[in-house]
Image: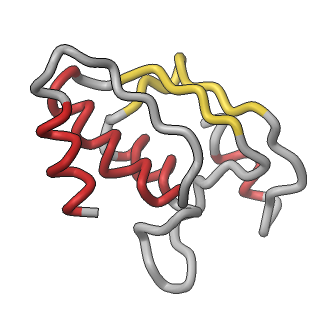
Amino acid sequence: MRIINESYDVILKSDVIPLAIGGDHSITLPMLRSIAKTHGPVALVHVDAHADENDEMFGETETHGTVFRRAYEEGLIIPSKTFQIGLRGTGYTAQDFTEATD
């Protein structure tokens, strides 16, 4: 995650708009950290079958399934301009479906 964050810090020094498609979802958090450090919180369109907003997975707080909870908690994204498209039966508990609406 540190390497991705540092790489994006360098990329964002250029006059470019980075686009990331595919890959393990855990790469998104360091990208968002770098982008927010440079530009402030951002709008987000997340296309996936899973919301990736769990508090922890496998005892870890930074995984592919916790990305958007951490991004929200850290103020990296603008909640009113964040859209998740394609979600399906993604919940582990009933709370998973209501937390993201708070």
Q: Residue at x 58, y 63 (%)?
A: 65
Please state which of residues 77 and 39 is positioned toward the viewer in this rendering.
Answer: 39
Residue 41 on image: x %, y %: 31, 25
Q: Is residue 98 left or right of residue 82?
A: right
Residue 1 on image: x %, y %: 29, 63
Q: Is residue 17 left or right of residue 85?
A: left
Residue 102 on image: x %, y %: 60, 36
Q: Which residue sits furthest right?
A: 89
- In this rendering, the count of numbered labels is 0
| Quadrant in the picture for residue 42 | top left
Q: Is residue 28 left or right of residue 16?
A: right
Q: How is the image coloured?
A: secondary structure
Q: Residue at x 10, y 26 (%)?
A: 13
Q: Residue at x 64, y 26 (%)?
A: 83
Residue 32 on image: x %, y %: 34, 39
Please state which of residues 27 and 93 is positioned toward the viewer in this rendering.
Answer: 27
Q: Residue at x 56, y 76 (%)?
A: 57
Q: Is residue 72 left or right of residue 22?
A: left
Please state which of residues 24 and 46 is positioned toward the viewer in this rendering.
Answer: 24
